Amino acid sequence: MENKNQQEHVHLLIIGSGPAGYTAAIYAARANLKPVLYQGIQPGGQLTITTEVENYPGYPEGIQGPEMMVDFEKQATRMGADIRYGLATSVDFSKQPYKVIIDEEKEITADAIIIATGASAKWLGIPSEQRLNGSGVSACAVCDGFFFRGKEVAIVGAGDTAAEEALYLSKMCSTVHMLVRRDEMRASKVMQDRVLKTSNIIVYWNSETDEVLGENKVEAVRIHNNKTGEKKEVPVSAFFVAIGHQPNSAIFKDYLELDDQDYIVTVPGSSRTSVEGVFACGDVQDKIYRQAVTAAGSGCMAALDAERYLSAKEHH
Ligand code: NDP
């Protein structure tokens, strides 16, 4: 016998609780779509691991990332969204109504689904990096670079993100020490040229990070050259990690079209995925902008797309 509590049908299901998911919930609730939102393993998403957010419009004095996400949640709740704690662990989009399993046990079916599961920054995996996270170690130069104006900073990575962030940092920091693990960069030629032409970016080739040094805040980084074995300590006030992001799309891979880096593919200018009635917004489908404000904007798009889809379905 099936346990009734373990099965439920909802009109609109939103998976994920960063700026994209909550914005979708605010719009969907106001459109009377009765959204149910599951928050996932990290309610509030990546903003809950940053400190101050100064570039989200509407907060003239800035705001702490975790506090901003509490505000988003409150606003969604006030509009009538049903916000729940729980992690989507598998899905079945093979036929309607689509199925989503929460915490490996509860089965939800939904008329439409908005995916806002975000992405996670990749880390090097050394203990000092975690210990000093938020105290000078950051995976987001655009978020945190400003706090290190006039200071020397390090950035690890050699892709387009690292190049872009190194250039961004070079405009406000005195020196940017860029740590590249091979003797070439993966970044596009034009980005590499820009980096190499910027006088206050010093590129360290064949260089790997052993340790981020500092008691309560970043004071230096110890690196070694993997060709010569030479070790070096570089004094810096911040250590930025820009070695890529992993979109949280694994549970959807059998049903939705993903690109070669596992981002969900959406029809340009919309939030539509390869499956009708399933929409995606925020970082799980955006590898370029990745900002709270762009995620929120795309969450709004997803709610409007879902509303149009559901109303067309009802009038069919
Ligand atoms: P990428 O996967 O392209 O690059 C990751 C970089 O990090 C690589 O240089 C890699 O080195 C390095 N790396 C990975 N692990 C480690 C490690 N443990 N230690 C040291 N270095 C490490 O990620 P990006 O985030 O840069 O870019 C993702 C995608 O988004 C790309 O397709 C990129 O082109 C695109 N993008 C485009 C932008 C634009 O068009 N403006 C801006 C930003 C991103 P290695 O090369 O040795 O593997």
Image (cartoon, grey):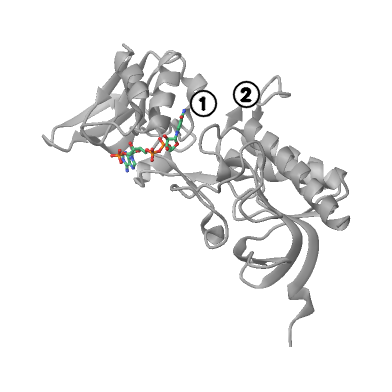
| 185 left or right of 145 in image | left
Q: Is residue 192 left or right of residue 260?
A: left
Query: Residue drawn 17% across and 38% down?
Result: 226
Within the displayed image, which quadrant is ligand 1 positioned in?
top left
Q: Is mark 2 within 8 Å of ligand 1?
A: no
Q: Could you tell whether 87 is left or right of 128 in the image?
A: right
Crowding near the residue tagged with mark 2, few <14, some 14–19, many ≥20 C-alpha atoms within 10 Å: some
Please provide percent x and percent y for residue 141.
47, 27
Residue 213 in the image, given as x and y percentages of width and height: 33, 33
Which amino acid, by three-letter code, is at mark 2? Answer: Asn
Residue 239 vertical position relative to residue 249 in the rendered view, above or below = above
Residue 55 tag number: 2
Residue 129 or residue 247, whichever sits in front: 247
State whether residue 36 is above or below residue 236.
Answer: below
To which residue does mark 1 refer? Answer: 142
**Amino acid at pointer 1:** Val
Classify mark 1: residues with Cα within 10 Å, few (<14), some (14-19) or many (20+): some
Q: Is residue 253 visible?
A: yes
Q: Are marks 1 and 2 in contact (CB under 8 Å)?
A: yes
**Place of residue 138 in the rendered image (x, y in percent of width and height, measured from the top left):** 46, 34
The picture quadrant where one finds residue 143 is top right
With 27 as the anchor, is 46 left or right in this view?
Answer: left
**For numbered disc 2, what is the local secondary structure?**
loop
- In this orientation, which residue lies closer to the viewer: 314 or 224? 314
Instruction: Say if 221 sits above or below 253 in the image.
Output: above
| Residue name at image x 20 percent, y 35 percent | 224
| Rendered residue at 85%/51% (across/down) | 311
